[in-house]
Amino acid sequence: MLKFATALAAAGLLVSSVSTSVSAQPIAPTHDGAPVVRVSVQPKSVKPQFKRQRVHLVTNEAPGTIIIDTNNKFLYLVETKDRATRYGIGVGREGFGWSGVVKIGRKAEWPGWTPPPEMRVREAAKGHILPAFQEGGEDNPLGARAMYLYKGGNDTSFRIHGTNQPWSIGLNMSSGCIRMMNKDVMDLYDRAPVGTKVIVVGPGNKQGEISFDDRGIDILRTLFGG
């Protein structure tokens, strides 16, 4: 019984309390001299439902397809017609939601970040000075990996990326992009090649017709693999 409970806990099927500490980090200059406040990389608790899980997902989408449900904050990597890996995500704040069918056009490890000019203006009005460019690393908002989403051969400016704010998973936080815990985005990065079809289900229904039904955790496969 103890072994089974331990396995359940490892699979995220039992809830345990997590206590963490937040450490202050110094301010470092960027290439253009603009200050960047280092965000603590100490993880805070993530709700159990947003931890990576193997699930029963009924869909007609082909294996290898990524389905992003922005309403429920889940990203699915389809494996068969009734199996998928489900990851928790953070999505754009209200007003930045989007939908559509795109592809992974390129990928990068520990990517650099170039905030859009409109974001720099918007954040400056709030007193937040963003750099014109920030090198990749632990303090970079794009986290450990980034997958750049293209449509018709053009960069949409939307990305699936990691985050140095794991507590934001399950929330509306970033400006339109899809953020994942670093360990999850690294896992997805290794499994989703350039050219992968990505269906983003969100406001406007621009993704068109899609059918998928999450029927919950695949307990046996989660515990014993396969």
Image: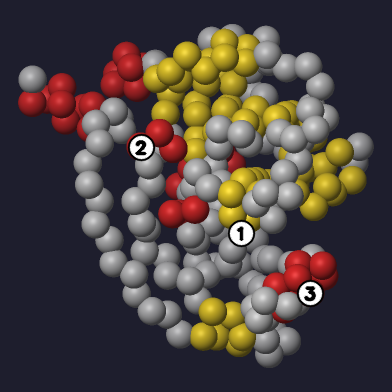
Q: Amino acid at mark 2?
A: Pro
Q: Residues within 10 Å of mark 3 (few under 14, many from 20)?
A: some
Is residue 195 visible to the viewer in this orientation of the structure? no
Q: Is 34 rendered above or below residue 180? A: below
Q: Residues within 10 Å of mark 1 (few under 14, many from 20)?
A: many
Is residue 165 visible to the viewer in this orientation of the structure? yes
Q: Which residue is mark 2?
A: 48
Q: Nearer the viewer, residue 222 or 121?
A: 121
- Secondary structure at numbered mark 2: helix
Provide residue 76's location: percent of width, then percent of height. 57, 28
- Taking the spot 39% from the left edge, 16% from the top edge, the residue there is 218
Q: Earlier in the sequence, mark 1 or mark 3?
A: 3
Q: Amino acid at mark 3?
A: Val
Q: Is residue 65 left or right of residue 207?
A: left
Mark linked to residue 142: 1
Q: Is residue 31 left or right of residue 37?
A: right
Q: Is 61 rendered above or below residue 112? A: above
Q: Amino acid at mark 1?
A: Leu
Whole-angstrom CA distance, mark 3 to mark 2, is 36 Å
- Secondary structure at numbered mark 3: helix
Q: In the current view of this chain or complex, which residue is farthest to the left?
A: 2
Whole-angstrom CA distance, mark 1 to mark 3, is 19 Å
Q: In the current view of this chain or complex, which residue is farthest to the bottom?
A: 33
Q: Which residue is mark 3?
A: 121
